[in-house]
Image (spheres, rainbow, N blue to C red):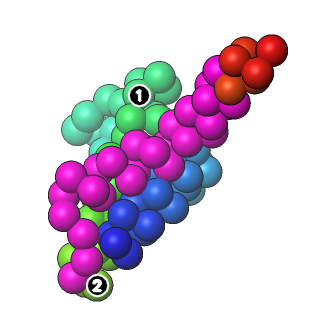
Amino acid sequence: MWGFIVAIIGGLLVAPAEEVLAKPFARLIAPVVKIEENEMRALSFALVLLIVGIIVELIHSGKPFWVILGAVIGLFGQRLFTWGRGQFDKRRG
C-alpha cells in the first residue's frame, strides 16, 4: 500500500523533476548518449521511477505492478481527473 502511495507521489513529481534531475543527468551522459529535448519527460519518468523503486524496496512495501500503476496515475492523474469530470458533466446535462 505504501509503495502505491509513494509511486503516485513520484508520478506527480515527474514534471518538476525534469529541471532538477533529467536535464543535469542528460548533460552528464551527453558525451556517451545524446538525449533530445522531446525525450526529457521520458528520462524524468525513468529517473523518478528508479528513485521510487529504491524507496519502495527500502520500506519493503509494494509489488512492481502497483508501483508502476501508481506512477502512471500520478503522471496522468490530472488529465484523467479532467476527462472524468467532463464525462460526468456530460451525463448530468
Q: Amino acid at mark 2?
A: Ile
Q: Residue 28 in magenta?
A: no
Q: Looking at the picture, how far across and down is residue 84, in whole percent?
A: 61, 29
Residue at 25% of width from left, 77% of height from top?
61
Residue 80 can be seen in this image: yes
Q: Main secondary structure of the magenta part?
A: helix
Q: Is residue 28 above or below residue 58?
A: above
Q: Secondary structure at mark 1?
A: helix
Residue at 34% of width from left, 72% of height from top?
1
Q: Quadrant of the C terminus?
A: top right
Q: Earlier in the sequence, mark 2 or mark 1?
A: 1
Q: Residue 82 in magenta?
A: yes
Real-space CA distance between mark 2 and mark 1, rounded to the nearest whole angstrom: 30 Å
Q: Is residue 61 above or below residue 67?
A: below
Q: Looking at the picture, how far across and down is residue 41, in whole percent?
A: 47, 35
- The tag on residue 3 is none
Q: Amino acid at mark 1?
A: Glu
Q: Which residue is mark 1?
A: 39
Which stretch did the figure color magenta? 60-87
- Image position of 84 (left or right of 57): right
Q: Is residue 57 above or below residue 49?
A: below
Q: Looking at the picture, how far across and down is residue 50, in whole percent?
A: 29, 59
- The tag on residue 59 is 2
Q: Looking at the picture, how far across and down is residue 19, in whole percent?
A: 59, 48
Q: Quadrant of residue 42?
A: top left
Q: Which of the two residues, 67 or 87, is positioned nearer the viewer here?
A: 87
